[in-house]
Amino acid sequence: ITILDIGCANGLLLHSLMEWSNHQLTPYGVDPSKERLAGVTEVLPELKNNFALLKVTELEHLSSHGLPSQFDIVFW
């Protein structure tokens, strides 16, 4: 199950959902703040490439950042 968190900050919510869920989740996230997004390397270092510096108004550019263009779940 793929999940996109718009405004993910450091990815802590996605990390928690992965631990709490009975399903295999593949997390992705975008955030407009480079400073907040930098924390992903601490929370989910093995998945840091699943995150991108993007504004919500730029979501059409997901694939140019190596992220899928469709997700099973989107959280905002």
Image (tube, grey):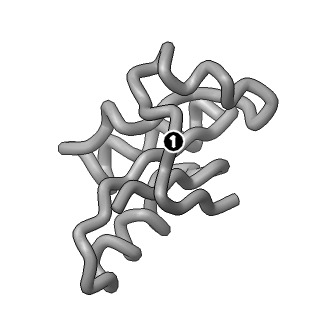
The answer to whether residue 40 is left or right of residue 47 is right
Identify the residue at horizontal 80%, vertical 30% (top origin).
57
| Label 1: how many Cα within 10 Å (few below 14, some 14–19, many 20+) | few
Would you place residue 13 above or below residue 56 in this image?
Answer: below
Quadrant containing the N terminus in the rendered view: bottom left
For residue 11, which quarter of the picture? Answer: bottom left
Identify the residue at horizontal 43%, vertical 64% (top origin).
14
Quadrant containing the C terminus in the rendered view: bottom right
Where residue 70 appears, x then y in whole percent? 51, 41
Identify the residue at horizontal 62%, vertical 39% (top origin).
31
Would you place residue 6 above or below residue 76 in this image?
Answer: above
The answer to whether residue 67 is left or right of residue 21 is right
The answer to whether residue 39 is left or right of residue 48 is right
Where residue 67 appears, x then y in whole percent? 43, 30
Question: In this view of the protein, which residue sits in the foreground, 39 or 20?
Answer: 20
For residue 27, which quarter of the picture? Answer: bottom left
Furthest residue toward left? 46
